[in-house]
Amino acid sequence: MRIRHWPYDEVCVIQTGRVAIEDADGGRVEFGPGAAFLMPAGFDGRWHTLEPTCKIFVGVSAR
C-alpha cells in the first residue's frame, strides 16, 4: 500500500504475521511477532503485508 504523508504518529506492535515498511528512498525494514515500531507523521513510502497480520496500534495526532 502506497502511503503519502502519513497523517499522525502511530506506534505499532505486531502480534502475528509479518509486514515490511519501505521508505521513499527504498530503505526497507521487516517486522514480525513481538516487534514494535513507530510510523512517524509525514512518512512517505510503502506498507507491505507479507503475511496476514494482527497488530496493536496507537495513533497520536499533533492537534
Image (cartoon, grey):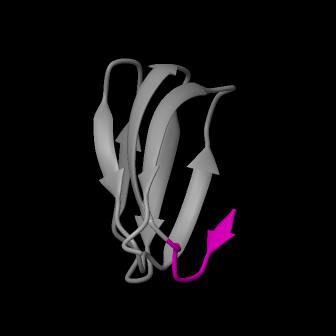
Name above or below for residue 62 compared with residue 31.
below
Q: Position of residue 40 (x, y in %)?
A: 35, 66
Residue 35: image quadrant is top left
Q: Looking at the image, which residue is at 52% across and 40% down?
A: 19
Residue nearest the observer in this picture, 10 or 47 = 10
Left or right: where 2 falls relative to 27: right
Residue nearest the observer in this picture, 37 or 22 = 37
Residue nearest the observer in this picture, 7 or 49 = 7
Q: Looking at the image, which residue is at 53% across and 28% down?
A: 55
Q: Position of residue 51 (x, y in %)?
A: 64, 28
Quadrant where the C terminus sits is bottom left
Q: Position of residue 4 (x, y in %)?
A: 59, 81
In the image, the segment drawn in magenta is 1-7
- Count up the numbered dots: 0
Dominant SS of magenta comes to: loop
Residue 33: image quadrant is top left
Q: Looking at the image, which residue is at 62% across and 27% down?
A: 53
Q: Position of residue 32 (x, y in %)?
A: 41, 26
Left or right: where 52 falls relative to 62: right
Name above or below for residue 18 compared with residue 44.
above
Quadrant where the N terminus sits is bottom right
Name above or below for residue 49 compared with residue 43.
above
